[in-house]
Image (cartoon, rainbow, N blue to C red):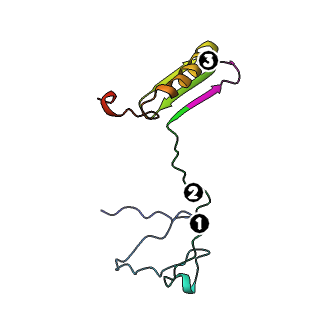
Amino acid sequence: MTTPRRPRLEGQPPAITSRTAAEPAAPRLAAGEPKGAARKGVPSALRPDPHPADGRYPVAWLSIASQRYSHMPTAASQCQCGWNRSAIGHAQVAALIEAHTAHRDTCPLRHPQEGRAAA
C-alpha cells in the first residue's frame, strides 16, 4: 500500500528520490579570518596582561538589594569558608552587615592558624 501523494508545501525541501553517498563540503573561511601568514602558523604578537595579578582574590561577598515597591531590603553574606547567611528587613539587614564585618576578623581563610592552634 502506498501513501497518497500530497502537493509539496512552500518552504519544504524536495523529497529525496535516490540514495547516494554524501560529498564532503568544501572548507569555508569564517568572516574576517586572517589569510596568509597567520594561517600558516606564524606566531602573533601578544600584548602584556593589562591587569597583572597581585596575589589578592575575593574570599567573601556581601550583596544588598532593595525591592522597588515594597522597600523591603534583602542581603546575603557568603564566604568560601562556608559562611552563608541571608536577611530580610531593615533591622536584620543591618545586623547581617555587622555580622559580615565581624566575620572578616575571624574567618579562617583570611587568618590561617599555625602551629598548635591549628590542631
Q: For the residue labelled by badge 3, is the local secondary structure a helix, a strand or a loop?
A: helix
Tell me if mark 2 has few (under 14), some (14-19) or many (20+) residues whose alpha carbon lies within 10 angstroms of its own.
few
Q: Measured along the vertical axis of the image, is residue 105 above or below residue 6?
A: above
Mark nearer the viewer, 1 or 3: 1
**Closer to the N terminus: mark 1 or mark 3?**
1
Q: Which residues are magenta?
A: 62-72
**Closer to the N terminus: mark 2 or mark 3?**
2
Number of dots carrying numbers:
3
- Direction from residue 102 to residue 71 in the image, left or right: right
**Rendered location of residue 1, percent (x, y):** 30, 62
Residue that appears at 62% across and 12% down: 91
Q: For the residue labelled by badge 1, is the local secondary structure a helix, a strand or a loop?
A: loop
How far apart marks 2 and 3 lie (CA) works out to 36 Å
Using the image, tell me which numbered label, if any, was put on residue 48. 1
Residue at mark 3: 94
Question: Which of the 4 quarters of the picture holds residue 72?
Answer: top right
Q: Residue furthest top?
A: 91
Residue at mark 2: 52
Residue that appears at 44% across and 70% down: 15
Question: Which of the 4 quarters of the picture holds residue 109?
Answer: top left
**Rendered location of residue 16, percent (x, y):** 41, 72
> Residue flagged by tag 3: what amino acid is it?
Ala
- Direction from residue 22 to residue 45 in the image, left or right: right
Is residue 31 inside the magenta stretch? Answer: no
Q: Nearer the viewer, residue 50 or 19?
A: 50
Using the image, tell me which numbered label, if any, was put on residue 28. none
